[in-house]
Image (cartoon, rainbow, N blue to C red):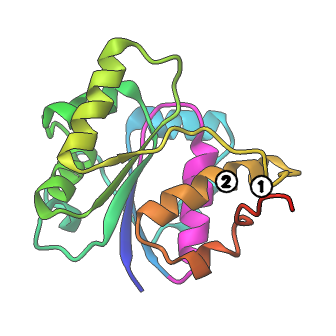
Amino acid sequence: MSRFILGVTGASGSIYATRTAMHLKRLGHHVTAIVTAPGREVMEFEGETRFLDFCDVVCNVGDFFAECASGSADYAGMAVVPCSMGTLGRIAAGTSDNLLVRVADVCFKEHRHLVIVPREMPYNLIHIENMERVTRAGAVVIPASPQFYSKPATIEELVDTVVAKILKHLGISQEQLDGIVKRWNPPA
């Protein structure tokens, strides 16, 4: 069992957070959540408050004394899903003005997996430069752009095509991912 942190911001697409937490729990991992105030509002508006049912710990975004704020805490990595462009900018700048951004900074300094999932579009030059900065610092940016070659039949299956990519870059094994989305098999 590994321990992961999921940060949720005010960008639309909280279903991505719910499905990520659900699959991590189903695979036997520990989930710590940090949800911003706008993230909670969007989650409620989009009907995704069940996200919290899949979390072992929910930290207050203003609590800098939370265990996950320390580099000595044993976490395998973090995903910020969905990630607003404002949060992306604060992570890229290293402002650490709330627990979510502080934990992302800890992931950088401790060389832990950090996956950032922007859901907003289109991107302007500032967004792209911030994605470049976090990528250079060691994060993986995975835009919430689902794939269609597995022929997903439901919204959940479509969302899981992105979630499987998130989990892969958090270090989840391919064997565990096979139960989430079919691997690409080119036509014969």
- Residue nearest the viewer, comparing 142 with 74: 142
Image quadrant where residue 97 sits: top left
The number of callouts visible is 2
**Secondary structure found at label 1:** helix
Q: Is residue 57 left or right of residue 70?
A: right
* Residue placed under numbered mark 1 in the picture: 157
Locate the C terminus by quadrant: bottom right
- Magenta run includes residue 76: no
Single out the residue that lies furthest toward the top.
124
Q: Nearer the viewer, residue 94 or 50?
A: 94
Q: Amino acid at mark 1?
A: Glu
In three-dimensional space, the C-alpha distance between marks 1 and 2, rounded to whole angstroms, equals 7 Å
> Residue tagged by mark 2?
161
Q: Residue at position x 17%, y 73% from top? A: 73
| Residue 13 image-quadrant placement | top right
Q: Quadrant of the N terminus?
A: bottom left
User: In the image, residue 170 lies at what x, y percent?
Assistant: 41, 65
- Residue 20: within the magenta? yes
Vertical comparison of 2 with 107: above or below: below
Q: Residue at x 70, y 66 (%)?
A: 183
Whether residues under marks 1 and 2 lie with C-beta atoms below 8 angstroms apart, the answer is yes
Q: Residue at x 13, y 37 (%)?
A: 94
The reply to whether residue 63 is visible in this rendering is: no
**From which residue to which does the magenta span run?**
7-28
Q: Name the spot of residue 146 as percent of width and height, x first.
A: 66, 43
Name the kind of residue labelled 2 in the image: Thr
Crowd class of label 1 (few under 14; some 14 to 19; many from 20; radius 10 Å):
some
Q: Residue at x 76, y 63 (%)?
A: 185
Instruction: Point out residue 184 in the picture as x, y percentages from the top left corner.
Output: 72, 61
